[in-house]
Amino acid sequence: MTELPETDLPVTAAATFCATLVDEWVRCGVTDAVVAPGSRSTPLALALAADGRLRIHVHHDERSAAFMALGIGLATGRPAPILTTSGTATVELHPAVVEAHHARVPMICCTADRPPELHHIGAPQTVDQTRLYGPVTRWYVDPGVPDEAARSSWRSLAARAVAEACGPPAGPVQLNLPFRDPLVGRTDDLPPAAADDGAWHHRVAAVGGIDHHLVSSLIDRLGVGGEGPAPRGVIVAGAASGGRGLDPGAVHHLAQVLGWPVLAEPRSGCRTDVLTAIAHADALLRHAGFAVGHVPDVVLQLGQPLASKVVGQWLAASGARHVVVDPDGWWFDPDRTASVVVAGDPSAVAAALCRSIGHAGHPTDPSDPDATWLDGWSIADAAASSAIDVVLAAHTEATEPAVARDLLAALPDGGSLVVASSMPVRDVEWYGAARADARVLSNRGANGIDGVVSTAVGVALAGEPTALLIGDVALLHDTNGLLGLSQREVDLVIVVVDNDGGGIFSFLPQATQLDGERFEQLFGTPHGVDLAALAAVHGIAATVVEDRVDVVGALTEAFTAGGLHMVVVRTDRTANVAVHDEIHAAVAACLAG
């Protein structure tokens, strides 16, 4: 095919408009963009590719492409514009848009559209894309077909899209962009940039919101500022907005001052090797004696709650005063027990509380004889960790708790672990040991298993060594995330727990209340897919392992070599339930002893 010389192409408003958007996005700090192939999106696709300052990631499947953009936003805190053609291609973005909304991850959805005259006449690939994603978008705009008369607004449009996506709160933005033929054209001179050569718009979060009155009010609500006996409290540390971790130094310093344990979820970044960090709250609170003997008077929840239903039910039944701190004041209170929800950065609130309590002269000295509350938690957590190790060491075969524990331990320093919902995220939360120099990420906004492979690819594209822990069903939900993956330059180790079906359902009442055939038909859902062969189709070498020592060896080899690897760990769903029960019994026995 002979390429038309650029000088023979017509100068079009669409080409100039799209080049302006891209130039302004670069000025706003955007570094990556994701493109799903299509015709109507041609003007913006060409502008993205021609700019040269952005990394362009092309993906055949729009749904996977959107989750890949989500992963980039999750890892970097910057939106990676995702571009699709018109029609049902735009609908494919919806699952990732919903996750971006609930998880507060920046995303810019550029949905190319047919011009108005092609609507309502049966033109192909033409659907109503107006506010396609409903109320979950932070901003929706349709600027109309590009027109030189509106060129003064183009930079503002691009910069505001980034500002709205980054929040607060961060989330998805939809730019619905109709284009007329010709779709290929040359650019004219771009509209002038801002005088300082930077972004056209900036959004700055208000500072000074954590003032003396707020801190004093929190101290009163927590009951830590009076003359009476210090309350027994717990700090629940979860992920903050966009899956970001907390400042572990600030959180644990406050915990030391108060003499409270920190029930640390892996994504919080607070599961470090310090006295106040509690890694195995789920296992501890399954023991009735411990749960009853350690009921708190007050709960300070920093960020999102834990995945553990056991912990959530224990907190709900405690009757404790419950204070939630979230950067955007989002209502993370599924049991409706929060007496107050604070809109503020959790780490900054922890630091401010620590300073104020110390200045007020009411610190709790952990070495004081009355500090047995924290000691009880810390000693029990260490005992639980040892009991878990003993149980897992007795199993030479690969077990799902051991896979989670070993993978987190093997992750390179500074690396990221992306964890799928369902059992993987629970196994990492329940059995993952302290790890200060690794980041744990997960699509826990909507808690779905869709798009997890693509999310991990997006995280890896941000440049960090990345591992993905995923179940077989979640992998099959997003096999298109493997498309072209062998050609991308990523350090990514995909660890698939293959128990031939939906493992989490074996823990639910359905497993014992239904006969085996009906349970397998509707919940176990064995698929029979050879995952190693599936990986080979995509040019990905897969190692299949069934023993724990082989799992550790395969992980060590993969992380040492770098690049792209898949490790398929074969387990049994029934045996997996038994191992979990064995761990819980061992922890209970050590606590009783």
Image: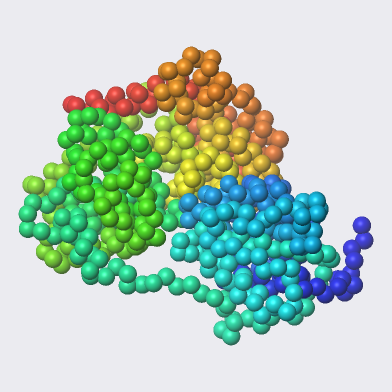
Report x, y in % for residue 95.
58, 46
Q: How is the image coloured?
A: rainbow
From the viewer's perspective, is residue 73 above or below residue 204?
above
Whether residue 249 is visible = no
Front residue of 226 and 140: 140
**Occupied quadrant, residue 347:** bottom left
Q: Is residue 329 left or right of residue 159?
A: left
User: Which residue corresponds to the image point at 53% horizontal and 33% vertical from the top-left?
Assistant: 471
Front residue of 230 and 575: 230
Q: How many marks?
A: 0
User: Which residue corresponds to the image point at 56% horizontal and 70% vertical from the top-left?
Assistant: 160
User: Which residue corresponds to the image point at 27% horizontal and 34% vertical from the top-left?
Assistant: 285
Q: Quadrant of the C terminus?
A: top left
Q: Quadrant of the N terminus?
A: bottom right
Q: Is residue 274 left or right of residue 308?
A: left
Report x, y in % for residue 55.
65, 61
Q: Is residue 4 left or right of residue 153?
A: right
User: Which residue corresponds to the image point at 64% horizontal and 27% vertical from the top-left?
Assistant: 530
Whether residue 348 is visible = yes
From the viewer's perspective, is residue 274 above or below residue 78?
above
Report x, y in % for residue 450.
57, 41
Report x, y in % for residue 462.
56, 56
